[in-house]
Amino acid sequence: MKQTLNWQNVAYESPPIYSGVWPRIKNEGKILLAENCSFRSFRTRPYITVLKDAVLEIGQGTFVNDGVNLCAKLSIKIGANCKIGDMTYIYDTDFHQVSPQYPTKCAPISIGSNVWIGANSMILAGSKIGDHSVIAAGSIVVGEIPAKTLAAGSPATVIRQLDMPDDWVRD
C-alpha cells in the first residue's frame, strides 16, 4: 500500500484503510489524504484523476464508497468525516464546452466536514456544500448548499434545515 501511494505521489498522514480493490489513480497534481480515510470497492473500482497542477484533499475519517469518481482540474477539498455514497461523481470541470459562446466551466469544489452525499449523486464545478449537510441520493449539486441542510433534486435545492450540535459526527 505505502509503495503504491508513494509511486502515485500521494501524500498521506497515515495509510488509508481500504476494502476490496484499491482505487485507480491518475495523479499529475497533488493528492493529500488525512488520517483514517477509507475506500471501499467490492463491485466498482473508484477512480481518482488529478490533472496537472490540480489539488485533491480528502479530510480525516472520510469514507469513499464503491464506484466514486473524483476528477480535479483545479481543486476539490473534502472535509473531515464525510460519507460519499457509491457511484457519486465529483468533477470540478465540465471537460468540454457546449458551444463557442459557453466556455468550459472549471471551478473549485468545497465540501465541508461531516457531509453525507447519497448514492448516484453528482457534485459539479463550483459547488460548495456546508458542514453537516446531507445530499439526497441521485441529486445534482451545481451551486451552494448551506451548512446543516438536507438538499435533493436536479439541481439540488434545500428541502429543510437539520438540527445538530456543531461537534456531532456521523457514524
Image: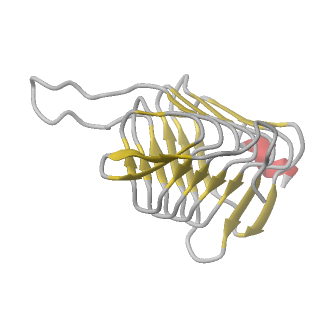
Between 78 and 66, which is closer to the camera in this rendering? 78
The structure residue drawn at horizontal position 65% and vertical position 76%, both measured from the top left corner, is: 42
- Counting labels gives 0
Give how far across and how far down residue 107 sits, in percent.
Answer: 41, 25
Q: Is residue 139 above or below residue 91?
A: below
The structure residue drawn at horizontal position 57% and vertical position 61%, both measured from the top left corner, is: 85
Residue 13 placement, left or right of 143: right
Instruction: Identify the image quadrant of residue 21.
Output: bottom right
In the rendered image, which quarter contains the C terminus? bottom right
Q: Is residue 1 above or below residue 165?
A: below
In the rendered image, which quarter contains the N terminus? bottom right
The structure residue drawn at horizontal position 9% and vertical position 23%, both measured from the top left corner, is: 101
Between 115 and 58, which is closer to the camera in this rendering? 115
Instruction: Identify the image quadrant of residue 33.
Output: top right
Describe the colour scheme in one phrase. Answer: secondary structure
- Looking at this rendering, what residue extends furthest in the bottom direction? 43
Residue 73 placement, left or right of 140: right
Give how far across and how far down residue 153 sits, in percent.
Answer: 34, 54
Give how far across and how far down residue 27 sits, in percent.
Answer: 60, 38
- Looking at this rendering, what residue extends furthest in the right direction? 14
Give how far across and how far down residue 133 sits, in percent.
Answer: 58, 44
Between 106 and 3, which is closer to the camera in this rendering? 106
The structure residue drawn at horizontal position 40% and vertical position 61%, both measured from the top left corner, is: 138
Between 58 and 139, which is closer to the camera in this rendering? 139
